[in-house]
């Protein structure tokens, strides 16, 4: 929940100027709802895709303040973030609610960026993979394993969100490999193909080392996405 029309215009123009016509990587931006159409117009001629940060569990109706998947599709979104740690931890979204949002996104041809991850307490208790398995199971049990093949997964260690802490590349790789193995238990082909992003204080300074890990396919960028130069440095790291 950052930005104004002026600051977002400056940020996006800096991003697209730095990227130019580079289509060697896939870049997705997910601004707040009220700026979606503004950003859509700014990235229209560049290799940048538009997504949203959240969506409603329902398709339409008397849900004042909510934004539906159909509305997001209508304004040009191709992706939507589902189950971000702040939605889970701060706003109290349950695994069941997140699974419903995941399904609603796919019904409107939106690709869910499905976030999973553990708290510091859960990690210290050795429960990281148990928590992640529960979060994945909620979606698989609701939507079926095939739905994961039409999604992007994102590992967010809650203890590294907005804290400046980052899992070491080896710690992140361990969880990413475990997450891919969880998917493989359901479908090996989907597990091999699905993209798994790392989201935990990724910055230009650490992106290259993280992205060199075998099972880290990209980043879900938080604070660094508010600085076009830092974000561009991450993009360069992702391009190899």
Image (cartoon, rainbow, N blue to C red):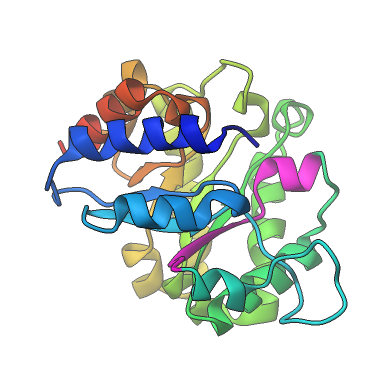
Q: Is residue 80 above or below residue 3?
A: below
Q: Position of residue 21 (x, y in %)?
A: 12, 48
Check the image and report above or below for 161 versus 42. Answer: above
Residue placed at 49% from the left, 65% from the top?
Answer: 183
What residue is drawn where x is 34% and y is 49%? 42
Answer whether residue 101 is visible to the viewer in this image: yes
Identify whether 218 is placed above or below 153.
above
Which range of residues does the magenta coloring cover? 76-89
Left/right placement of residue 228 relative to residue 23 reads right
Counting from the top left corner in percent of width and height, residue 194 is at 38, 63
Q: Position of residue 186 (x, y in %)?
A: 51, 74
For the N terminus, the image quarter is top right
Q: Quadrant of the C terminus?
A: top left
Task: Give the residue at x 63% y 18%.
Answer: 163
User: Image height check: is 73 above or below 115?
Assistant: below
Let me know if residue 79 is in the magenta part. Answer: yes
192 and 223: which one is in front? 223
């Amino acid at each position: 929940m950052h930005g104004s029309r002026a600051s977002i215009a400056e940020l996006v123009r800096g991003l697209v100027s730095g990227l130019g016509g580079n289509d060697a990587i896939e870049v997705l931006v997910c601004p707040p709802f009220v700026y979606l159409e503004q950003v859509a117009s700014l990235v229209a001629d560049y290799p940048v895709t538009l997504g949203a940060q959240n969506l409603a569990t329902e398709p339409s109706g008397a849900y004042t303040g909510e934004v539906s998947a159909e509305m997001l599709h209508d304004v040009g979104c191709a992706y939507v973030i589902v189950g971000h740690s702040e939605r889970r931890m701060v706003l109290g979204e349950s695994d069941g609610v997140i699974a419903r949002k995941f399904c609603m996104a796919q019904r409107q041809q939106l690709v869910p960026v499905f976030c999973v991850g553990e708290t510091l307490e859960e990690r210290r208790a050795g429960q990281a993979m148990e928590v992640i398995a529960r979060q994945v199971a909620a979606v698989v049990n609701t939507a079926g394993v095939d739905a994961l093949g039409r999604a992007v997964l994102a590992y967010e260690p809650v203890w590294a969100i907005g804290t400046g802490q980052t899992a070491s590349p080896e710690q992140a790789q361990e969880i990413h490999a475990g997450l891919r193995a969880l998917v493989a238990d359901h479908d090996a082909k989907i597990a091999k193909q699905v993209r798994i992003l790392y989201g935990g204080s990724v910055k230009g300074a650490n992106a290259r080392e993280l992205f060199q890990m075998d099972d880290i396919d990209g980043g879900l960028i938080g604070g660094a996405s508010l600085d076009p130069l830092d974000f561009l440095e991450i993009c360069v790291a992702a391009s190899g």
